[in-house]
Image: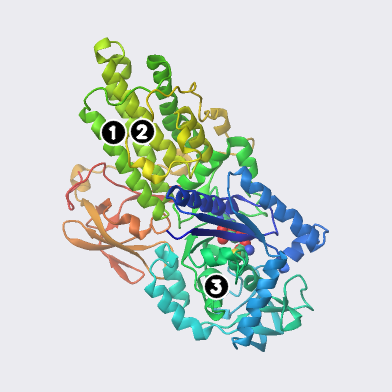
Amino acid sequence: MNPFYITTPIYYVNARPHLGHAYSTVVADVVNRFHRMCGQETYFLTGTDEHGDKVVRAAKEEGLSPLVYVDRISDLFRKLWPELDIEHDWFIRTTDPNHVKVVGDVLQKIYEAGDIYFGEYEGAYCFGCERFYTERELVDGRCPDHDTVPEAIKESNYFFRMSPYQDWLIDHINTHSDFIRPERYRNEVLAFLREPLEDLCISRPKTRIQWGITLPFDDQYVTYVWFDALLNYVSALGYPDGKLFKKLWPNVCHLVAKDILKPHGIYWPIMLKAAGIPVYRHLYVHGYWNVDETKMSKSLGNVVEPLELKNQYGTDAIRYFLMREMVFGLDSSFSERALIQRINSDLANDLGNLFSRSLTMVHKYFEGIVPKGDVAPESNLDLEVKSAAFEAVQEYQDAMEGFAFHKALMAIWQFINRINKYIDVTAPWELAKKKSQRNDLQVVLYNILESLRVIAGLLYPFMPRAAHVMQEHLGITWATPFQTLHDFNVWGKTRPGTKLPKTITLFPRIEPDKLKPKPGETVPSKKELVPARPEIEISMEVFQKMDLRVGTVLRAEPVPRSKKLLKLKVDVGEERTIVAGIAENYQSEDLIGKQVVIVANVKPTKLMGILSQGMVLTASDKGTCRLATLDGSCEPGTPLM
Ligand code: ME8
């Protein structure tokens, strides 16, 4: 098995770490731990990006030299990660001498190969993005990211010729379906590549900025910060001759958010190709965290500090929330209210209660000693629990491999609910009343403990602390620090006769007064959110004119140039094309096979040039759109009454 190598972006040191940085780094840690569970050797890289205009300006604002300033902020990132139980193998800084040397060597190599030339450029420069913009890229003459008018700058600079690699890159993306994931970002890169690629300006004159890596072939210039930063992924491994480079490259999984798709999806593969380095294997792109539906920004004062959250709610709860709440690839909104609700319902209630009620029973009925699981014939209920466990493991594994972390957690929680039901139906407290049912009681409790073992093991990548505590309390001392996937394909690994420690509360409930609005905060009531519609008389006859039907989604794809719309092919007894405004909350691939409710007799209308032959029913909760579905499967075309 190839070793697995995962990277996060290296973060700019122009500001303190926030929730967005924490999310990417937690995802990398979860994926890394999952690969360790699969028995793979892994390597996890993160770090800080320390050169460029942005950093110089931030240092100036603090009255510090860039050198002192970058040390200080880089340290904040470095010290944050262990607080969030992130176990990276290396923390790279672009000011590390080895990195500086690699950047110089690669530049020289590409220069000698003839892909770098000197030329004059006049253009619109955004200092926030540290790059030139073409007219076409600006929105009403303003930078799309910073909403500022770029400055007109005329400069002689060095350029990296990218156009000769354009066709190669298109072909590479087309022939490697897992190169850029999820699909929407792969399509976005292909859409960029439909326009001719312009050469990339890779230098900045020292007359304007000195804080950077000097070009090896002209000491009057420093390297453009992106050309410098991207190379961290190979310099950290000791490119070109280092052992790690030879062992790990190019079997890498780069993880970034959508804001830096272009440098990673276009510049980086072309840089690698031009430098004669094999191209990376995978780029995984996630969406953006907003806060209470608004963009997180310093000026709005709504930046969420991961350390504060951790101190208040604990590392596991934060990690769980981030991974459960965001659908990888789509945007999500953070709110403390939602976090507390998840802690109380999923962690304290579902998981925590199951754990403590189960262990309490083992202590009460068997003096804390793991009973035997094979002393009575298995009932159908027992068999069902076993197969539910294997199903959960399979669903979990598929979801983890596809970066659908929310689904992996849903699979665990479905299993947790299944075990809670098993306890309710088998009622061990009743079995305990009769001596003749002692063996049945043993089997039931053993199955519960086995289920908890599987649950603890599957939780390890997400909540390593809780997983560890659970395993300790289940007597799973043979699998420190974690169980492997093989351990879940066998039923019966919990050892009868093991004496278990007293149970504990895994996740304390958060007091409801935390949910009360803070002074000055108003929580809109439902009524304020959605004004009731005026009462009108609708006769049954009129209501029944509406043709509501069950539809099964057969295919789904994004509508080009639209952020909101998806084009669906739906089976409503016949195949219909329906355009739905759900792209911000659903990914095409997640919809296939889903059953939805369709208004089948609305007048067909054209949306973005596509004739939509029906309407999908949805609910919009504070901007998050949810499809109306059925609680069991129905024949497509079945009318709703
Ligand atoms: O772009 N939601 O650094 P950066 C989710 N130095 N993730 C977010 C986020 C949000 N609201 N905000 C930031 C840079 N991130 C360059 C990278 S790599 C060779 C150089 C995360 O400090 C996300 O991973 O601006 C995003 O891609 C990254 O931080 C940008 O970090």
The residue at 46%/38% (across/down) is 479
Q: For mark 2, give the secondary structure.
A: helix
Q: Earlier in the sequence, mark 1 or mark 2?
A: 1
Instruction: Report whether the residue tagged 3 is closer than 8 Å to ligand 1.
Output: yes
Q: Can you see residue 207? A: yes
Q: Can you see residue 196? A: no
Q: According to the image, label 1 marks what residue?
A: 385
For the C terminus, give its image quadrant: top left
- Identified by mark 1, the residue type is Val
Q: According to the image, label 2 marks what residue?
A: 451
* Rendered view: 485 above or below 608: above
For the N terminus, give its image quadrant: bottom left
Q: Earlier in the sequence, mark 3 or mark 2?
A: 3
Q: For mark 3, give the secondary structure.
A: helix
Disc 3 crowd rating (10 Å Cα; few below 14, some 14-19, many 20+) is some
Q: Is residue 147 left or right of residue 28?
A: right
The residue at 19%/56% (across/down) is 572
In the foreground, 204 or 34: 34
- Identified by mark 2, the residue type is Ser
Q: Position of residue 582 (x, y in %)?
A: 38, 57
Work out how far the residue at label 1 is from the one at label 3, CA to CA, in angstroms.
48 Å
Q: Is residue 45 left or right of residue 596?
A: right
Marks 1 and 2 in Cβ contact (< 8 Å): yes
Q: Quadrant of residue 229?
A: bottom right
Image quarter for ligand 1 equals bottom right
Q: Earlier in the sequence, mark 1 or mark 3?
A: 3
Q: Which mark is residue 268?
A: 3
